[in-house]
Image: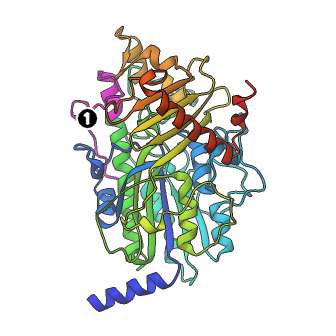
Amino acid sequence: MILAGLVAAAAAAASPPNIVMIVSDDHGRADLGCYGNPVVRTPNLDALAADGTRFTHAFCTTASCSPSRSVILTGQHNHRNGMYGLQHDDHHFQSYDHLRSLPVLLAAGGYRTARIGKFHVAPEAVYRFQTVLSAGAANDPATIGRSPVEMAESSRGVIEARDERPFFLYFASDDPHRANAVLPDGRPTFDTFPQPNPFGNRPEGHPGIRPVAYRPGDVPVPSYLPDTPECRAELAEYYQAISRLDQGIGRLIGILKAAGKYETTLILYLSDNGAAFPGAKTTLYEPGMRLPLLVRAPGRRNPGAVQEAMVTWADLAPTLLDVAGVSVPAGAMDGRSFRAGLDGGALPGWDEVYASHSFHEITMYYPMRVVRTRRHKLIWNVASGLAYPFALDLVKSPTWISATRGGSGKFGARTIDAYLRRPAFELYDLERDPHEVVNLAGDPAHRKLQAELLEKLKSFQERTRDPWFRKWSHE
């Protein structure tokens, strides 16, 4: 048995592995058991972490769906690849036609490529997968994206195919994103107040899912959110959606094991951005950008490893291409490969990350550029004179409505006014101020630090061809 395992590991190391990338929608880092949440039930994701590597400092580079997914699939920051905001017909954001994305490069390198669930990037030619197992609009109740066990079952053909070529499966759930409720006339709406958003949960359930319900009084309320009955009720629904997703992932991993493909498959789990609550999604505060990343690599020798290197979603494509043995033209990607750290090994020099947000929907313009080190974060709010614009699902959320009607003037650890009106620069000491409420920008004692971080930020903008770099010289 031991010899057979060694032979399998040697074979896995000698040939390119299969790759399964699981991307959830709006799942915060704090909301998994393996990241310390004492209530939410995620046994399958916890098992993946125990058999692989759990990254503690993984970050999206923009906390909005389409832009973030474009970074995941191109290795370029969204301000460089052109996906400035959500890819809907009425916004018309899409990446540049000349780009060659991860699935296209893997296909050219001999991989079979397939996707299922949420897509939400464009144009199709740039992000082409050879096989599309499901299609449809993002967050559409009529699609399979809310039914992760069905998604897993629909992936069997790709996994079980008798084909010597390795496969790349992009498994993208709509869970645990907020869901539209449906009005009597059939129109979708986020207006559910005072009832919580359903987060895709429904009375009739989903095929193959055993619903896991949570009591609002049991859920932990994070510091960035208000402890109100409405917020607790929404967190309970959100947790139920997470547990549904976890069961789908369990089914997917079971299919890989039954097909004899688990040991030869690199499996990643990540979220596109933070939870769909004000203070997380669409912000570049920690709850919006610091996210879960679990990786289980073939031939791993250190199961249950913890990786503390600071990585971003711009690093994912270069890493997967490196693992697959597919070369990337010099300068084609902003990220770099962390293949050497997949099993938890040290990655010296991985101690700072950058982030870039410009739009959510086209009317929600609020560009931010961020540099974050181990201890400090500098945010440049490029259009700080504007009030902070809300994503529709957030401004309509009972969590936000209950706090703004409560009269306290507070939203979690921040004041509502501070959330809506932001200065040009925000500088935080994350060691002393993990909730990011004490702005040190402009403080004489931190003038040198601010200047150093600002130069780093400008260098980042210049090397990633950021159009907003011109704002320094042409306001």
State left or right for residue 298 relative to residue 101. Answer: left
Quarter holding the N terminus? Answer: bottom left
| Percent position of residue 244, x then y | 37, 49
> Which residue sits furthest top?
407
Quarter residue 335 falls in: bottom right
Residue 233 within the segment the image draws in magenta: yes
User: Magenta segment range?
Assistant: 207-235
Count of numbered tags: 1
**Callout 1 crowding tier (Cα within 10 Å): few <14, some 14–19, many ≥20:** some
Please tell me in which quadrant of the rendered image residue 326 appears: bottom right
Left or right: 156, with 215 as reference point: right
Determine the residue positioned at 62% across, 54% down: 334
Q: Is residue 171 above or below residue 470?
A: below
Judged from this view, the residue extending furthest toward the right is 98
State the image coordinates of residue 4 (x, y, percent, origin top left): 32, 90
Which residue occupies the foreground of this view, 344 or 65?
A: 344
The residue shown at (46%, 56%) is: 349
Q: Mark 1: which secondary structure? A: loop
- Whether residue 406 appears in this view of the structure is yes
Residue 119 showing in the rendered view: no
**In the figure, 230 relative to 321: above or below?**
above
Where does the image place residue 87, in percent across and percent down from the top left? 66, 41
Magenta span contains residue 172: no
Q: Is residue 410 above or below residue 67?
A: above
Q: Nearer the viewer, residue 383 or 378?
A: 378
Rendered residue at 53%/25% (across/down):
425
Q: Main secondary structure of the magenta part?
A: loop
The residue wearing badge 1 is 219
